[in-house]
Amino acid sequence: MPRFSTLFLATVILWAVGYAVWLTNFVFEPLPYQVDHSLRGITIFALGALLSVGIGRMLNRIQSRASPRILTIVVIAAMIAATAVLASFDILVMRVIAPRWGPPTWTIALQQIPFVWVFIAWVLLYFALTADAARRDREVRLAQANTAAIDAQHRVLVQQINPHFLFNALNTVYALVLEGDDARAGRCLLALSAFMRESIDRSAPRKVPLSRERELILHYLEIERIRFGERLHLDESVPSELLDRNVPALILQPLVENCVKHGLNGHARPMTIWLSAALEQNELVLNVEDDGQSPPECDAPASGVGLDNVRKRLHLLYGDSA
């Protein structure tokens, strides 16, 4: 249904235009008569506007329940009744309250029929506003459904990261247990607990402050340092003024994990991961780099869970500009 304020404003404008057109019939009348008709017309057209608003309220109540046939009958009956009321009021004002215009006659009554055209125009305006309101409601519902679908897809993809990382971290703990290093295995489990607590708490939002994303990276690297020791280094270049900037949740962890997986795992040499953030043309640019010894097959396009997940989530958040 159209909002009442919109319907009321449209009704006032329509009847004001009708009043202006009606006044043209008295342009060549003597001045006293022009003033008399003008004052009489104000009351008549104000009543017409109120009758129209009343019809609109009635149609609002029955439109969703009545069949098209019943609705058509109600609209026609309402227009006839409203025209009769308006014509009667016009005759009452002109012929009874101001009897100098002469007694009412059938000819005078028939002259009021053109009022019905204003009501017809108003009914057409009402249904046009109703159709426009329904269209806008459909667009809002469609946008809400699309947003809900994107949120659901995003949550599924974000939640996919946790099991993917969890399996890798548990493999690290398992390797430490096999080595008999219970102390490092215990520290790894504690770091894993902190990581999972943080990631589960923020699994729902699409975007989080860069500071929280950085904390998650530190939790993850703490786990990996327990395994690789001094071979794994982190070099950060993240200005403090950028830490409040929002970034997609869990967008950096898969990239850092790939650095470890492809650049350090299986190699004896140490590796440094560079994590940086900067503003370029007022856009936040994040970089994750490493100097690890990647195997030759990494030159092919990556198709693992982490990077594929990152691509999909960026596309959900930014569309073609991802």
Image: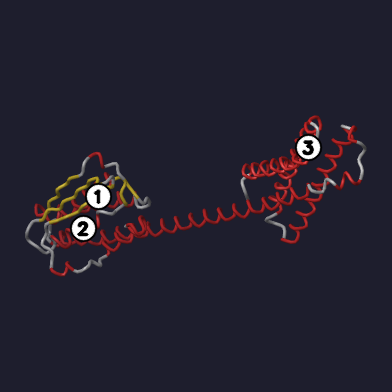
Viewer-nearest residue: 53 or 229: 53
Type of amino acid at the residue the image marks with label 3: Phe
| Label 1: element kind | strand
Q: Kindly state the secondary structure of the residue where label 2 is placed.
A: helix
Q: Nearer the viewer, residue 105 or 27?
A: 27
Res 53 quadrant in image: top right
Q: Position of residue 86 (x, y in %)?
A: 81, 43
- 87 in relation to 170, above or below: above
Real-space Cα separation, disc 2 to disc 1, in angstroms: 19 Å
Is 65 placed left or right of 321 in the picture?
A: right
First-in-chain label (3 vs 1): 3
Residue 251's mark? Answer: none
Report x, y in % for residue 109.
87, 45
| Real-space CA distance between mark 3 and mark 2, rounded to the nearest whole angstrom | 89 Å
Badge 2 is on which residue?
Answer: 257
Image-quadrant location for residue 11: top right
The mark found on residue 285 in the picture is: 1
Looking at the rendered image, the disc whose residue lies closer to the viewer, 3 or 1, is 3
Q: Residues within 10 Å of mark 1 (few under 14, many from 20)?
A: few
> Which class describes the residues within 10 Å of circle 3: few (<14), some (14-19), or many (20+)?
few
- The residue positioned farthest toward the top in the image shown: 32
Q: Residue at x 69, y 53 (%)?
A: 124
What residue did someone put label 3 on? 28
Residue at screen point 78% across, 33% down: 34
Of 250 and 86, the residue lying toward us:
86
Mark 3 lies on a secondary structure that is loop
Q: Amino acid at mark 1?
A: Val
